[in-house]
């Protein structure tokens, strides 16, 4: 049975992979260099936090379980549907703000659901939530 610590770290891995994968899909759809630059900056942050979660899972002898293939496909199909007719900076930024907002909520849920997680896992989860809240504000600047 997984501990709260492992469960929280798994949530962080899945959350950061969702962010990285979404940015990977959207970055090729825009010609707005400022938007691309912000996407790359945020992708680096997701990667950094993802690697920290992987390291913490390794330290407790657990295997990271990232996004499932079905989840990746669902996100990809949603992105294609929402950008089929509108690849504008405004539309992409709206989608990214919504996704960042969902990520913040997922972090809040993880904090409530796994109260016995280690201080390090809790700190990483808060860091991710803060990063996503700041990302949401950054995306809103493009709307």
Image (spheres, rainbow, N blue to C red):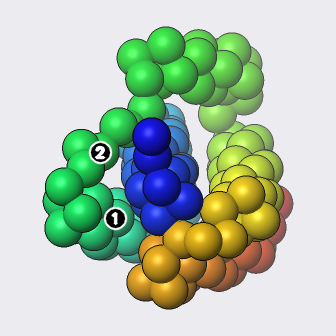
Residue at (48%, 55%) from the top-left corner?
A: 3
Answer yes or no: is residue 114 visible. Answer: yes
Relative to 141, residue 68 above or below: above
Query: x, y percentage for residue 21?
Result: 42, 40
62 on left or right of 25: left
* Disc 2/disc 1 C-alpha distance (Å): 8 Å
8 on left or right of 143: left
Q: Secondary structure at mark 1?
A: helix
Residue at (70%, 49%) from the top-left corner?
A: 99
Query: x, y percentage for residue 61?
Result: 19, 55
Residue receiving disc 1? 53
Q: Which mark is residue 64?
A: 2
Which residue occupies the extreme front position in the image?
A: 1
Relative to 1, residue 130 above or below: below
Query: x, y percentage for residue 51?
Result: 25, 64
- Kindly indicate whether the residue at mark 1 contacts the one at mark 2 (C-beta within 8 angstroms): yes
Residue at (18%, 67%) from the top-left corner?
A: 59
Q: Which of pointers 2 and 1 lies earlier in the amino acid sequence? A: 1
């Amino acid at each position: 049975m997984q501990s709260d610590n492992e469960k929280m770290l798994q949530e962080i891995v899945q959350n950061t992979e969702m962010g990285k994968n979404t940015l990977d899909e959207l970055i090729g759809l825009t010609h707005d260099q400022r938007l691309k630059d912000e996407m790359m900056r945020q992708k680096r942050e997701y990667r950094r936090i993802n690697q920290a979660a992987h390291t913490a899972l390794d330290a407790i002898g657990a295997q990271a379980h990232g996004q499932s293939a079905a989840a990746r496909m669902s996100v990809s199909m949603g992105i294609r549907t929402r950008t089929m007719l509108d690849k504008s900076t405004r539309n992409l930024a709206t989608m990214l703000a919504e996704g960042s907002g969902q990520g913040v909520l997922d972090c809040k849920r993880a904090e409530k659901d796994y109260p016995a997680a280690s201080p390090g896992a809790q700190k990483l989860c808060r860091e991710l939530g803060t990063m996503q809240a700041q990302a949401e504000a950054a995306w809103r600047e493009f709307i």
